Amino acid sequence: MPEETKGPDSVLPQPEGAKAPAETAFTGTPPAAAGAESKPSEAAKPPVAAKSAVPAAAKPPAAPAKPTGPVPEPWESEFVAQMRQQYGSGIEEALRYLGQTYLTVDQSILPEILRRMRDDEGFDYCVDITAVHYPKREQQFDMVYVLYSFPKNERTRVKTRIKDGEHVPSAVAIWETANWLEREVFDMFGIVFDGHPGLKRILLPDEWKGHPLRKDYDILLQDREWVQANLGIVSGQ
Amino acid sequence: MSEKIDTSYLDLDTKDETFLDSTELVLNMGPQHPSTHGVLRVILKLDGEKVLGTECIIGYLHRGVEKIGENRTYTMFNPYVDRMDYVAAVSNGLGYCETVEKLLSVEAPPRAQYIRVILTELCRISSHQVWLGTHALDIGALTPLFYAFRDREEILKIFEKYCGARLTTHAFRIGGCIYETYDGFEQDVKKFCEFFIPKLDEYEELLTTNRIWVTRTKGVGILNPEDCIALGVTGPVLRASGVKWDLRKAQPYEGYQNFDFEIPTGVNGDTYDRYLVRVAEMRQSVRILQQAIEAIPTGPIMAKVPKVIKPPVGEVYHSIEAPKGELGYFIVSDGSTQPYRVRVRPPSFVNLQALDKMVRGLLVADVVAVIGTLDIVLGEVDR
């Protein structure tokens, strides 16, 4: 795992570059190319090496719970430095956790950052848009944009924090795929996207009340009125 | 016995303008329609038989999987993910287990990885077989359905022997596999590989040069690479448009870098190319299977994971190449035994969004072909 997580940083920027080291690293022990009986044990070696290193790191959490887990570390790169210089405190956090990077930006510059990520940084594929609800925080919601760049073979996340009831500018103009993904976020969290071409519920019926993925929405809670009227039963439970 | 038909209810003096000038017709397709592969409802706006636009109504199978995830422990949630894409349950489980392992900074032991690769590739083949059978059936070729399901049985038998279940297998656990392979597992997989290649030729013989098949699929539902990327379409649909991108190669997981296989791609991005890509993918899966079964190492099948899984505080996004495209899990851990948030990025859901773009200007019958070629599973779309 540590090998894999450190890998993307140095190796992954170009797909070709990524492939070549992987191939050279394993040509010594190809499972079938050589086809010899003694190979399996050799082929097993690299993962074993990784494994022996990992449980040592993973074991402590079993006994004293959390304190020994990996901690997000600052994400230092030219790109982040550039962003910080341009947007100053608009970039709230730039962290790396388990080899994955994410930027937390201020809500006001979100559309600008997203557009920049696509146009200048090459993140042409918006993998996913979702939200996380933290009811105890003042800014209750985390909006999460998972982005991927085909030219760089790189993944990153852009996050922003918003208050309950605050609107988020829609990303449909940047990535078409945002359409349904934002509708799902609206359906599940009740976050409204400004400029969305047709913001309505997608998975739940239009008349449904409440947004199930909010933390205050109990797992047994449901829109009884709707269930009774449409399914003819008292409760779905 | 001729009774006079009461025509009073017919408005016989229909005006010309209501008839000839009306260019738009709204037609409802589904949710109970055999060619929608489950419970997909599509509202079609038509001009004669030409499709002007569509709207998908989904959610009929919504079970709140993500909400359930927040209320179950990491271990308890594992079987639930099988129920999303139920024709490729193994892939779903793999993605979930890997994501939690990533959170725990654990890696499955090599033997477990090989078992996982073997089962996942078998699962990919079986998923593509279901697609092939039903897609061909939608277009009017009845035989491939029987052929595909007959041969899929061999895979399901291996699953059944391995873990007791045929569809929703729950084959993997966080940290590896729980079951050691049964006696004769290797032979069964080898036998399947030998058995399956001629069967693939058989499918191709039935369809690839079949004139009706070619007419119904060539040039239908074209997606160009730019649209694919903008719409977030992944999997065989993306590859058929000529983008050589497969997560198994781009960001290898589970030791896929050890295997020698190719990424088949198409040229035109039409239904026919997607058919060719998926068939070629099945051949590549057989190649992976043959290599994996030769090289499967001995050793433990379970990494050292605590009995009670409590990942440290943090969040992680991890995705795998499921038969239908990029299947991603975004898990936020608050350090407790239950995930704080589980987000599933389902390939079918995102791919289905491309339907509207693909069918505009086509005929109603082509809509059926395009839904089939997208290879959606409504259990995964609705979750």
Image (spheres, coloured by chain):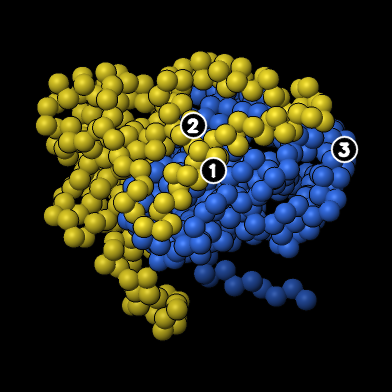
Is residue B218 among the parts visible in the rendering?
Answer: no
Which amino acid type corresponds to the residue marked 2 in the rendered image? Glu
Q: Measuring from the top left, give residue A28's x and y in whole percent.
A: 68, 20
Q: Which residue is mark 2?
A: A4
Real-space Cα distance between discs 2 and 3? 34 Å
Is B84 on the left-hand or right-hand side of A169?
A: right
Q: Secondary structure at mark 1?
A: loop
Q: Measuring from the top left, give residue A186's x and y in whole percent.
A: 30, 53
Is B311 on the left-hand or right-hand side of B166?
A: left
In the picture, which chain is blue?
Answer: B
Real-space Cα distance between discs 1 and 3? 32 Å
* In this view, B87 is above or below A209: above
Q: In the current view of this chain or complex, which residue is farthest to the left?
A: A89
Q: Secondary structure at mark 2?
A: helix
Task: Please identify, in this view, whether the residue under mark 2 or under mark 3 is nearer the observer.
Answer: 2
Q: Quadrant of the C terminus of chain A?
A: bottom left
Q: What hue represents chain A? A: yellow
| Local crowd size for mark 3, using a 10 Å CA cut-off: few (<14), some (14–19), many (≥20) | few
Q: Which residue is mark 1?
A: B107
**Marks 2/1 same chain:** no
Residue at x 55% of width, y 40% of height: A51
Residue at x 36% of width, y 51% of height: B312
The answer to whether marks 2 and 1 mark residues whose Cβ atoms lie closer than 8 Å is yes
Real-space Cα distance between discs 2 and 1? 10 Å
Q: Chain of mark 1?
A: B
Task: Please identify, in this view, whether the residue under mark 1 or under mark 3 is nearer the observer.
Answer: 1
Is residue A15 among the parts visible in the rendering?
Answer: yes
| Local crowd size for mark 2, using a 10 Å CA cut-off: few (<14), some (14–19), many (≥20) | some
Residue at x 31% of width, y 42% of height: A71
Viewer-nearest residue: A36 or B53: A36
Q: Which residue is mark 3?
A: B194
